[in-house]
Amino acid sequence: MRKVRTPARELAWRCAIAVFLVAISVIVLVPLLNLLALSLSDPARVSEVRGLTIVPKGFSLINYRVLAANPLFVRSILNSIFITVVGTALNLVVTSMAAFALTRPKLPFKRFFQVLIVVVMIFEPGLIPEYMVVKKIGLMGSLWAVILYKTVNVYYLIIMMRYFEEIPASLIEAAQVDGATYMTILGKVVIPLAKPALATIGLFYGVYHWNEYFRASIYLTDPNKYPLQLILRQFVVLDDTSALIGSGALFSYDEAARLSYDALQASTIIVAMLPVLIIYPLILRYYARGVMEGGVKE
């Protein structure tokens, strides 16, 4: 016999879920707020900031002034923006075109391409063949070596293929009857209906490009081309703060002497995380609205 939830039991269940969600939020937010508090604290009182401190001790923007005055840091932000914007746009265009082609019933050798996708998923080429290809085509030292890596992610390609397969064939056939080419159908029929899926994989691609540092450390040798995450790794992981000394001339000796490198590292982390923290809720909101409004029925 099925149990019927009483109002009291329903209320208790809702309260338990609320407490759990609040606990998870606290676990996620406290470290971020602690870093923010550390970065905004007065250098003379940074030592007062503990692991659970979420309110700055005093207030100072000197850490962000140091970062903003550092040409290498500013250039790394511009490099990361370029890599992320261009890379994500290229990913979305190529992934959408490939997914649309692979979902066409009359595509020649369709089965072969599907098997090839599975093979690539299981047996992904290693770093050495990839390095040899990049070197052979002359992309060593170029930002394009980072941008073009995984122009099509197989997993995201499958997501787009599954979404395109849900679009009624009658819409495609009606467009073909009106004389539309496949590119016209893709641009004016399929893509507008696939905005939630594009928002999802666009977020994945964008976060990947923004956080990329490993291949940048292999293929890029000019510090002026380093992305932000590579600079972040040098400052935070390797404790290499030598690049920041060049901006010391813009501040008094007293200010430079009072600088806390822990606070400076926290400021660097905050700057690196900020774009993702801003964009993610916007994309998620758009995705939710697209799911609610984008239902397509025969």
Image (cartoon, helix red, strand yellow):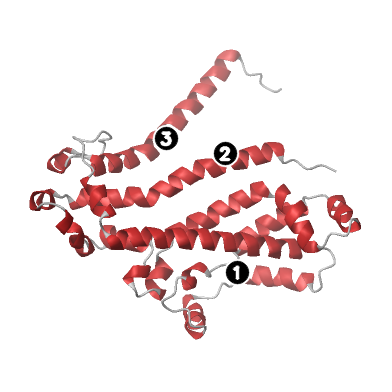
Q: Which residue is mark 3?
A: 25
In this rendering, position of residue 136 left or right of residue 232: right
Measure the alpha-carbon separation of dots 1 and 3.
36 Å
Task: Name which of mark 3 and mark 2 comes first in the sequence.
Answer: 3
Quadrant of the image occupied by residue 223: bottom left
- Marks 1 and 3: which is nearer the front? 3
Q: Is residue 233 visible?
A: no
- Secondary element under disc 1, as helix, strand or loop, is helix
Residue farthest along the front direction in this orientation = 250
Report the residue at 53% width, 62% height from top.
Answer: 86
- Secondary element under disc 3, as helix, strand or loop, is helix
Measure the alpha-carbon separation of dots 2 and 1.
33 Å
User: In the figure, 51 relative to 252: above or below?
Assistant: above
Q: Position of residue 270 (x, y in %)?
A: 33, 47
Report the residue at 75% width, 65% height from top.
Answer: 101
**Residue type at the position of mark 2:** Arg
The label on residue 285 is 2
- Marks 3 and 2: which is nearer the front? 2
The label on residue 122 is 1
Residue farthest along the top direction in this orientation = 7
Q: Nearer the viewer, residue 200 or 251?
A: 251
Q: Is residue 86 visible?
A: yes
Residue farthest along the bottom direction in this orientation = 136
**Residue type at the position of mark 1:** Ile
Q: Position of residue 198 (x, y in %)?
A: 63, 52
User: In the figure, 297 relative to 174: above or below?
Assistant: above
In this rendering, position of residue 290 left or right of residue 85: right
Task: Name which of mark 1 and mark 3 comes first in the sequence.
Answer: 3
Task: Name which of mark 2 and mark 1 comes first in the sequence.
Answer: 1
